[in-house]
């Protein structure tokens, strides 16, 4: 229900409720002579910010380059390049915004990575949102493949239906990702080899500290069957809260890649609303030599970004 009405709720808040509150607050705080004028100016600024975020900020895209250094990285993978994108929410990239997904795909292909990974939330609510975009999604390719995990929106979390219908929708979403040629990792892993060296790309199902979200991630199942005693593991997990609560405690994965937060979709003088909910909502976090990287996402359910463009991340692995 929340996801289905998120956009109308945002529009009402951004263009009606907040400007009205700001107007009357200014009338109360400032002398009568100036209160109306200041209130009108503040209200207008809020509306302009909302318009900018919806029609300019949301359409911006950054390519972000980062490096991860580790002594555990096999020498053959020094310089290995991974392109990460997250939270595409392609149900919002439709109609006049359809070009945005094509631009994202073109940008990723132009980077010529060794591997592409997607860290969840491909759809908004319904799997059928993916159908019109399959030709674009199917274009993504890399020498070592395209790997993905599910985000909370990729389950039937926000669908008003019985359990059987929800499960049918879950299977449909998964089938469409695989139809695009992606390797969907659902508590499983794959081994990538370079001569006698190898790394592990592992993908957990969604798990987060908020209990109303899907909590299907299983670390032990994801890494079951690994024979090497000290493998280099890249873990894909949509929700970054799983890093401290599950991943650090239950395995030795050196690098975890996540999304989910959207970075709060706004950065105003260095402050993001996501800071109220997440201790790590964008960029790097470290625990010793082990690291978490949180992408702020390619798209969003609500078409709004202010001071925080959508992003594609290029991660280069370096041997220490």
Image (cartoon, grey):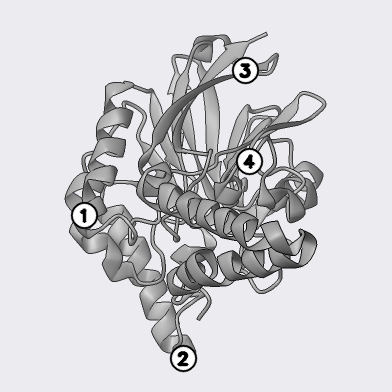
The residue nearer to you, when weighing 87 against 162, is 87
For label 2, the SS is: loop
Quadrant that contains the C terminus? top right
Q: Residue at x 75, y 54 (%)?
A: 276
Is mark 4 in CB contact (under 8 Å) with mark 3?
A: no
User: Which mark is first along the chain, 2 or 1?
Assistant: 1
Is mark 1 in CB contact (under 8 Å) with mark 4?
A: no
Residue occupying the far front of the picture: 33
Q: Which residue is mark 4?
A: 268
User: Which mark is first along the chain, 4 or 1?
Assistant: 1
Q: Give the Cα separation between the discs numbered 2 and 3.
A: 46 Å
Q: Nearer the viewer, mark 1 or mark 4?
A: 4
Q: Which residue is mark 3?
A: 73
Q: Which residue is mark 2?
A: 162
Is mark 4 in CB contact (under 8 Å) with mark 2?
A: no
Q: Nearer the viewer, mark 2 or mark 3?
A: 2
Q: Give the Cα separation between the discs numbered 1 and 4.
A: 27 Å
Label 1 CA crowd tier, 10 Å (few <14, some 14–19, many 20+): few
Tally of numbered tags: 4
Q: Nearer the viewer, mark 1 or mark 2?
A: 1
The residue nearer to you, when weighing 168 against 54, is 54
Q: Position of residue 166 (x, y in %)?
A: 43, 81
Classify residue 263 as left or right of residue 91.
Answer: right
The residue nearer to you, when weighing 264 against 163, is 264
Q: Give the Cα separation between the discs numbered 4 and 3.
A: 37 Å
Q: Which residue is mark 1?
A: 96
Q: Position of residue 82 (x, y in %)?
A: 46, 26
Q: Give the Cα separation between the discs numbered 4 and 2.
A: 41 Å
Q: Residue at x 46, y 51 (%)?
A: 48
């Amino acid at each position: 229900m929340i996801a289905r009405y998120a956009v109308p709720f945002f529009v009402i808040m951004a263009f009606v409720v907040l400007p009205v509150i700001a107007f009357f607050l200014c009338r109360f705080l400032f002398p009568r002579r100036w209160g109306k004028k200041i209130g009108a100016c503040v209200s207008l600024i809020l509306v302009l910010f909302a318009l900018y975020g919806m029609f300019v900020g949301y359409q911006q895209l950054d390519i972000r380059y980062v490096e991860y250094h580790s002594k555990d990285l096999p020498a053959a993978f020094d310089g290995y390049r991974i392109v990460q994108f997250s939270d595409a929410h392609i149900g919002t990239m439709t109609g006049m915004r359809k070009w945005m997904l094509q631009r994202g795909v073109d940008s990723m292909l132009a980077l010529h990575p060794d591997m592409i990974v997607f860290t969840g939330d491909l759809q908004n609510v319904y799997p059928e949102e993916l159908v019109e975009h399959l030709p674009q999604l199917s274009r993504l390719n890399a020498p070592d493949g395209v790997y993905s995990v599910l985000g909370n929106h990729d389950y039937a979390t926000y669908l008003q239906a019985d359990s059987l219908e929800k499960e049918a929708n879950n299977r449909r979403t998964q089938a469409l990702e695989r139809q695009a040629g992606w390797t969907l990792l659902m508590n499983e892993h794959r081994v990538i080899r370079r001569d006698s060296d190898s790394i592990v790309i592992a993908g957990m199902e969604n798990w987060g500290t908020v209990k109303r979200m899907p909590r299907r991630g299983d670390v032990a199942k994801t890494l079951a069957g690994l024979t090497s005693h000290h493998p280099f593991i890249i873990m894909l997990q949509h929700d970054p809260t799983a890093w401290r609560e599950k991943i650090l405690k239950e395995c030795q994965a050196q690098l975890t890649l996540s999304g989910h937060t959207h970075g709060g979709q706004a950065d105003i003088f260095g402050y993001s609303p996501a800071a109220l909910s997440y201790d790590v909502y964008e960029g790097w976090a470290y625990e010793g030599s082990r690291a978490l990287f949180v992408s702020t996402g390619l798209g969003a359910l609500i078409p709004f970004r202010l001071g925080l463009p959508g992003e594609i991340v290029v991660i280069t692995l370096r041997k220490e």
